[in-house]
Image (tube, rainbow, N blue to C red):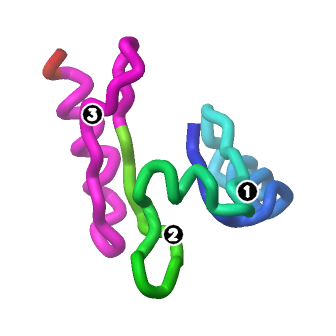
């Protein structure tokens, strides 16, 4: 699942354009971003963070990067295959 502060319609277009195999959830209020500390503290803008959550519902990986987009997937795949 992906979460963004963008609106639901924009996210659905994005998901369809890229044929993503997972749902995208709109967090317009920013509640999810705040709960996961995924907002820049002073400007309150959402950060780009990828989390890998295990079957036990614990966060196994939190990868933060605004610029290295391709590395998000690489880090998650490496951690997921490690166990």
**Label 2 crowding class (10 Å Cα cut-off): few <14, some 14-19, many 20+?**
some
Where in the figure is residue 45, as x and y percent of width and height?
A: 52, 77
The tag earlier along the polypeptide, 1 or 2, is 1
The tag earlier along the polypeptide, 2 or 3, is 2
In the image, 76 versus 49, the foreground residue is 49
> For the magenta stretch, what is the residue range?
52-81
Q: Secondary structure at mark 2?
A: loop
Where in the figure is residue 37, as x and y percent of width and height?
A: 41, 58
Q: Which residue is depicted at the point 62% across and 34% down?
A: 22
Q: Name the residue at the left extreme.
A: 82
Placement of the C terminus among the 4 image quadrants: top left
Residue 60 is one of the magenta-drawn residues: yes
User: Residue 53 is drawn in which quadrant?
Assistant: top left
- The residue under label 2 is 46
Q: Secondary structure at mark 1?
A: helix
In the image, 23 versus 55, the foreground residue is 55
- The residue under label 1 is 11
Spatial separation of the CA atoms under disc 1 and disc 2: 15 Å
**Label 3 crowding class (10 Å Cα cut-off): few <14, some 14-19, many 20+?**
few
**Label 1 crowding class (10 Å Cα cut-off): few <14, some 14-19, many 20+?**
some
In the image, 77 versus 6, the foreground residue is 6
Whether pointer 1 and pointer 2 mark residues with C-beta atoms closer than 8 Å, the reply is: no
Q: Which residue is depicted at the point 28% across and 46% down?
A: 62
Placement of the N terminus among the 4 image quadrants: top right
Spatial separation of the CA atoms under disc 2 and disc 3: 23 Å
């Amino acid at each position: 699942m992906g979460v963004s502060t963008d609106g639901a319609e924009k996210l659905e277009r994005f998901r369809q354009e890229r044929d993503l195999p997972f749902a995208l959830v709109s967090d317009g209020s920013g509640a999810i971003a705040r709960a996961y500390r995924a907002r820049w503290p002073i400007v309150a803008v959402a950060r780009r963070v990828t989390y890998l959550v295990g079957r036990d519902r614990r966060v196994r990986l939190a990868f933060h990067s605004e610029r290295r987009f391709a590395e998000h997937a690489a880090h998650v795949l490496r951690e997921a295959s490690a166990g």
